Image (tube, grey):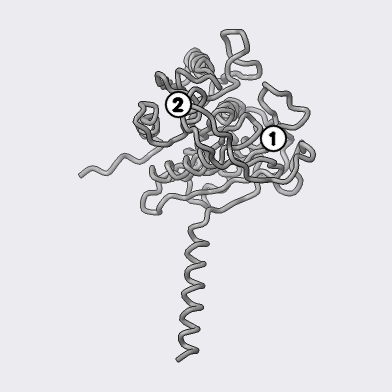
Amino acid sequence: MRRSSTFFLILCVDLAWAIVAAESPQVLKIWPGKVPDPSGNLGEERIVMSPKLDRIQVEVTEPTRMVTGVTQPTITIFRPAKEQDTGTAVVICPGGGYWNLYWQLEGEEVATWLNSLGVTGIILKYRVPRGPDEPKGEPARRPLQDAQRAVSLVRSKAIEWGIDAQRIGIMGFSAGGHLAIATATNFEKRNYEPIDDVDKVSSRPDFAVPVYSGYLKAKDKDELAPGLHVPPRTPPVFLVHGSDDIVSPPEHSVFMYLALKRAGIAAELHLYATATHDFGVRGSDHPYSTWTESCARWMRHQGFLKSPARP
């Protein structure tokens, strides 16, 4: 009897671990072997807490988990429930000024929201902090290499993962919003030397959602920042910003919207009065929290989500 009880206990433990393993998100390195254009010794990868700020600066004021010291970029894949899966996937680029990654607020929470829509959320852990050869106040160059590679890698796995290769978007927040736009407009040429068959697969996302982005407007000029351009095949873009954002002023999204429209690219811009920075996808009684509903409707209208079931 004791032996049977022990066997039953072991079986239950094994089953519990199997359930945990099944629910754990898959993590993949995006580069085989050596990472191109290495940024040098940035210390060990580690989790740190974001600083506590006030409402003048950000909407989510309490500290949340960040990741820094990233020298081996990865993607972490969060799949929706099978019965809800639309076949759409989104690469998520957390913000952090190209110094850190707001992994909890602008990564995991975003993936959970996307899963609720039937979308696979894929968090890109790109290289941070910026290297000594990447000047402060300018976008870092290595994250764009990581993002281009990530989109191609996801598309190369489309059949294996049950993803529609023509419904792969990119979404980013703050500096990650800049990275999303940079990826959506830099698909004609890679920012690194191709290394394998994955790099033969298109790095053009099928849509982009930059949220309270920085680095889009030129300093002291009413035009796009140097290095940004809008080629004819730029995908549809959904822009979100707070009007009272002092970290990344709303003009960054406004001038990007104007550039997209002038180039004939489908674009939608949502500005929220009195909203500041760093609101992610969290619910609130402030109107900015409705941006996720508007974005879901936009994605559905663009054909990236299945139509809701009718009674």
| Identity, as a three-letter code, of the amino acid under mark 1 | Pro
Q: Is residue 244 above or below residue 19?
A: above
In terms of secondary structure, where does tag 2 sit? strand
Residue 89 percent across, percent down from the top left: 48, 42
285 relative position to 125: left or right: left
Left or right of 48 on screen, residue 292: left
Mark 2 and mark 1: Cα distance apart in space: 27 Å
Q: Where residue 129 is drawn, which disc sits there?
A: 1
Which residue, as the protein is rendered here, is positioned at the far left?
311
Disc ID at residue 224: none
Which residue is depicted at the point 50% across and 36% down?
A: 62
Q: Which residue is mark 2?
A: 238
Q: Residue at x 73, y 42 (%)?
A: 195
Q: Residues within 10 Å of mark 1 (few under 14, many from 20)?
A: many
Q: Secondary structure at mark 1?
A: loop
Could one spot residue 301 in this view of the protein? no
Q: Decide: is 195 above or below 277.
A: below
The local crowd at label 2, few if under 14, some if 14 to 19, many if 20 or more residues have their Cα within 10 Å, is: many
Left or right of 206? Residue 272 is: left
| The one of 38 and 130 positioned closer to us in this rendering | 130
The mark that comes first in sequence, 2 or 1, is 1
In which quadrant of the rendered image does the C terminus lie?
Answer: top left
Q: Residue furthest bottom?
A: 1
Q: Is residue 139 left or right of residue 26?
A: right
Residue 129: percent from left, percent from top: 69, 35
